[in-house]
C-alpha cells in the first residue's frame, strides 16, 4: 500500500432545497460577488432568479455564456478581468463542470499578476485563488469536490487539466432536483465520465480490497441509477445517487493508497475534445472499451477478471481470458445501451487528424505509465480502433 497525504476542504451541502443555505454560506465572504454560468439552462430552471433573490443584499457582477469545454479566451480572461477591476470577494459558479472549471481558473487567475495561462499550463504553480462556491446542475465531472480544472485553448488545440489545493471549492451546494432537466444525452455522457473516473483509478497495479470495493460499488450504482434517470428524469432517488457517485468519483478518495494511475483515457479524450469540441463523456465512452482491449495482456488480466465478476456478475468459473473479454464487451454494451454513440465517425471525427492527435497526446499528456504504458503508436491504434 502506498503512502498518501490527503485533504479535501470542500463543504458539501446535499439534498432537496439545499440552496436555502446560500445566504449563510455567502455571509462568510465580502459583498462583491461574481456570478458565473453557462448558456442559459439555469434561467430555464428558475435557479438564476432564485440566486438573485437570495443574494439581494450583495453586489453581483455576472459572467454568462461559459461554454462546454470552457475556453481560456474569452471566458477565463474575461472573468479574471472582472475580478480584478471590480475587486470581487467571492465567485459563485452555477452550472455543470464547465462552469465550475472555468470559475476555478478565474479564481486563480484573479490572484496572479501575470498571464493566467502560466498557471493553467503549469509554468507557474497555482498558490492561491479567490474563494469560490458552486451550485451544481449536472452530475458528471466531480469538479464540485476536487481540485482540478480543465481549460481549452482553441488556437493551439490544447485542452489542459491542472490541479492545485487552492482549486477546491469552499462549498458545493448539491441539489439533485436541479439535474432533472439534464438531457438524456448529457445524463448518459455524465455517467460515462464518472464511470471512467472510477475505471481510471481501478485499473492500476497496486490496489486495496477497500478501494476495489468502493470502485466496484460506484460503478454498479452509476449503471443502475442512470437507467432509472433516463427512464424517469425526475426520479429523485436515482438523480441523487448519480450525483453523489459523480461527486465521489474524481477527488482521489477512491484510490488512496493505490499506486498512481496515468488516467490514459482522459489523456486521449482531451485531445478529441480539443480538436473537435466533442462532449467529454461521449469521447470517453468510445475510447474506454478500445483502450481496455488494447491493454489486455497477461499482466493486466487479473484486474479485468475482478472487474468482470464484481461489476458485471460474469461467471467466475469461466476461463480468465473469457471473463476479461466478456467484461470489455459488457462495458461497450452498457455505454451503447444508454444511447451513447460508440464510434468516432458518429461524432464527426475521421482518420485525417488521428496521427496528429496521437502525437499531441504522447508529447503533452504523459501516457507512458508503468502499469499499462502507452506510446504514440498505441494511442494511434486505439484511436483507429475507435473509428
Ligand atoms: O451552458 P448551459 O446552458 O448551462 O447548458 C449545459 C451545457 O450545454 C447543460 N446543462 C447543465 N446543467 C443543466 C443543463 N441542461 C439542462 N439542465 C441542467 N440542469 O449541459 C451542457 C454540458 O454542460 P458541461 O458543464 O459542459 O458538462 P459537464 O459537467 O460534463 O462538464 C464537462 C467539462 O468538465 C471537464 C470536461 O473535460 C469538460 O470540459 N472535466 C472536469 C473535471 C474536473 N474538474 O475534475 C474532470 C473531468 O474528467 C472532465 O475532464
Ligand atoms: Zn472526466
Image (cartoon, helix red, strand yellow):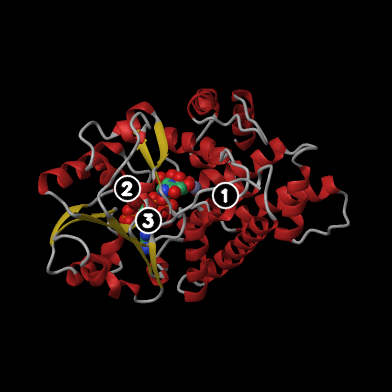
* Real-space CA distance between mark 1 and mark 2, rounded to the nearest whole angstrom: 22 Å
**Residue 283's spot in the image, x, y percent?**
52, 43
The quadrant in which the C terminus is found is: top right
Q: Is mark 3 within 8 Å of ligand 1?
A: yes
Answer left or right for 302 relative to 266. right
- Upstream in the sequence, badge 1 or badge 3? 3
Q: Residues within 10 Å of mark 2 (few under 14, many from 20)?
A: many
Report whether residue 235 is seen. Answer: no
Report whether residue 66 is seen. Answer: yes
Q: Is mark 2 within 8 Å of ligand 1?
A: yes
Answer left or right for 70 relative to 200. left
Q: Quadrant of residue 40?
A: bottom left
Answer left or right for 180 relative to 258. left
Q: Is mark 1 within 8 Å of ligand 2?
A: yes
* Real-space CA distance between mark 1 and mark 3, rounded to the nearest whole angstrom: 17 Å
- The numbered disc on residue 96 is 3
**Front of the two marks 1 and 2:** 2
- Dot 1 and dot 2 residues touching (CB under 8 Å): no
| In the depicted structure, whether residue 243 falls above or below residue 1 | below
- Upstream in the sequence, badge 1 or badge 2? 2
Q: Which residue is mark 1?
A: 196
Q: Residues within 10 Å of mark 1 (few under 14, many from 20)?
A: many
**Front of the two marks 3 and 2:** 2
Residue at the spot 56% in from the left edge and 70% down from the top edge: 228
- The numbered disc on residue 104 is 2
- The numbered disc on residue 59 is none
Residue at the spot 57% in from the left edge and 67% down from the top edge: 225
Secondary structure, mark 3, is: loop
**Residue 276's spot in the image, x, y percent?**
43, 35
Amino acid at each position: 500500500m502506498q503512502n498518501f497525504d490527503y485533504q479535501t476542504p470542500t463543504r458539501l451541502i446535499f439534498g432537496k432545497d439545499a440552496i436555502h443555505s446560500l445566504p449563510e454560506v455567502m455571509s462568510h465572504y465580502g459583498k462583491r460577488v461574481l456570478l458565473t454560468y453557462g448558456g442559459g439552462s439555469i434561467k430555464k430552471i428558475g435557479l438564476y432568479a432564485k440566486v438573485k433573490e437570495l443574494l439581494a443584499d450583495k453586489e453581483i457582477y455576472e459572467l454568462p455564456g461559459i461554454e462546454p469545454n470552457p475556453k481560456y479566451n474569452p471566458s477565463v480572461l474575461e472573468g479574471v478581468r472582472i475580478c480584478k477591476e471590480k475587486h470581487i470577494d467571492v465567485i459563485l459558479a452555477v452550472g455543470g463542470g464547465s462552469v465550475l472549471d472555468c470559475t476555478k481558473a478565474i479564481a486563480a487567475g484573479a490572484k496572479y499578476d501575470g498571464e493566467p495561462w502560466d498557471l493553467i499550463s503549469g509554468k507557474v504553480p497555482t498558490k492561491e485563488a479567490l474563494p469560490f462556491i458552486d451550485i451544481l446542475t449536472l452530475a458528471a465531472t466531480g469538479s464540485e469536490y476536487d481540485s482540478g480544472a480543465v481549460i481549452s485553448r482553441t488556437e493551439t488545440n490544447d485542452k489542459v487539466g491542472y490541479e492545485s489545493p487552492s482549486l477546491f471549492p469552499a462549498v458545493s451546494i448539491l441539489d439533485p432536483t436541479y439535474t432533472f432537466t439534464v438531457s438524456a444525452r448529457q445524463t448518459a455522457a455524465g455517467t460515462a465520465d464518472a464511470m471512467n473516473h472510477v475505471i481510471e483509478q481501478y485499473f492500476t497495479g497496486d490496489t486495496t480490497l477497500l478501494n476495489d470495493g468502493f470502485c466496484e460499488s460506484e460503478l454498479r450504482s452509476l449503471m443502475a441509477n442512470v437507467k432509472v434517470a433516463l427512464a424517469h428524469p425526475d426520479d429523485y432517488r436515482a438523480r441523487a445517487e448519480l450525483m453523489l457517485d459523480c461527486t465521489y468519483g474524481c477527488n482521489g478518495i477512491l484510490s488512496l493508497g493505490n499506486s498512481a494511475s496515468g488516467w490514459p483515457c482522459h489523456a486521449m479524450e482531451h485531445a478529441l475534445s480539443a480538436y473537435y469540441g466533442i462532449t467529454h463523456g461521449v469521447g470517453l465512452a468510445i475510447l474506454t472499451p478500445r483502450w481496455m482491449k488494447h491493454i489486455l495482456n497477461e499482466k493486466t488480466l487479473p484486474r479485468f477478471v475482478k472487474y468482470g465478476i464484481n461489476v458485471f456478475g460474469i461467471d467466475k468459473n469461466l476461463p480468465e481470458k473469457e471473463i476479461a473479454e466478456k467484461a470489455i464487451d459488457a462495458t461497450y454494451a452498457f455505454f451503447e445501451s444508454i444511447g451513447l454513440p460508440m464510434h468516432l465517425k458518429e461524432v464527426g471525427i475521421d482518420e485525417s487528424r488521428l496521427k496528429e492527435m496521437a502525437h499531441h497526446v504522447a508529447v503533452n499528456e504523459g501516457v507512458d505509465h508503468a502499469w499499462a504504458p502507452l506510446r504514440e503508436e498505441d494511442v494511434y491504434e486505439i484511436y483507429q480502433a475507435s473509428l
